[in-house]
Image (spheres, helix red, strand yellow):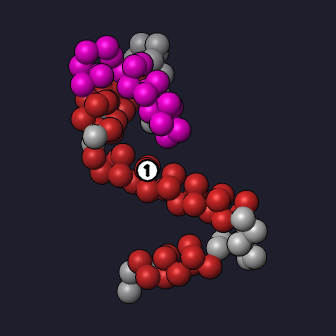
Amino acid sequence: MHAKFCAELIHREGLKAALDYCQKQNIEPPQFSLTADSHNAHVLREKAARMLSEIKWWKRRLGNKAGRDFEYGQMLQGKVTNIISDASLKYYLSKKRR
């Protein structure tokens, strides 16, 4: 949903609008300059546009955000006694690659 919306935003309004949307979702957007005029800056803008339009990029960022938000909620409830909550540790161990 986010990737498709960003692709449409980039097409209609430009890359700046997609960056603003990303920030409104509390997701750190790709880092690049909108104003620099060099070959490298142009390549980075193209790369950022591709990233913002990819489902995999959004899935990774939203998953990380969900994990951070969950841990923050666990901290507020006093359920974090070590570095991470027991629920997060159990989840990470179940997903650990062997």
Q: Nearer the viewer, residue 37 or 15?
A: 15
Q: Look at the picture and state if 28 lies above or below 85.
A: above
Query: Which residue appears at 24% of the width and 25% of the height?
Result: 8
Query: Which residue appears at 62% of the width and 62% of the height?
Result: 71
Which residue, as the protein is rendered here, is positioned at the far bottom? 98
Which residue, as the protein is rendered here, is positioned at the far front? 77
- The answer to whether residue 68 is left or right of residue 27 is right
Relative image position of residue 58 (x, y in whole percent): 36, 46
User: Helix, strand, or loop for circle 1?
Assistant: helix
The residue indicated by pointer 1 is 62
How many numbered callouts?
A: 1
Q: Residues within 10 Å of mark 1 (few under 14, many from 20)?
A: some
Hey, which quadrant is residue 18 in on the image?
top left
Magenta span: predominant SS is helix
Query: Which residue appears at 44% of the width and 82% of the height?
Result: 94
Which segment did they paint magenta? Answer: 8-27
Hey, which quadrant is residue 85 in on the image?
bottom right
Q: Nearer the viewer, residue 74 or 52?
A: 74
Relative image position of residue 33 (x, y in whole percent): 48, 22
Q: Amino acid at mark 1?
A: Leu
Hey, which quadrant is residue 3 in on the image?
top left
**46 inside magenta stretch:** no
- The answer to whether residue 42 is left or right of residue 69 is left
Q: Nearer the viewer, residue 38 or 2?
A: 2
Q: Is residue 52 visible?
A: yes
User: In the rendered view of the protein, which quadrant contains the C terminus?
Assistant: bottom left
- The answer to whether residue 89 is left or right of residue 6 is right
**23 inside magenta stretch:** yes
Q: Nearer the viewer, residue 20 or 1?
A: 1
Query: Which residue appears at 49% of the width and 76% of the height?
Result: 92
Relative image position of residue 76 (x, y in whole percent): 73, 60
User: In the rendered view of the protein, which quadrant contains the N terminus?
Assistant: top left
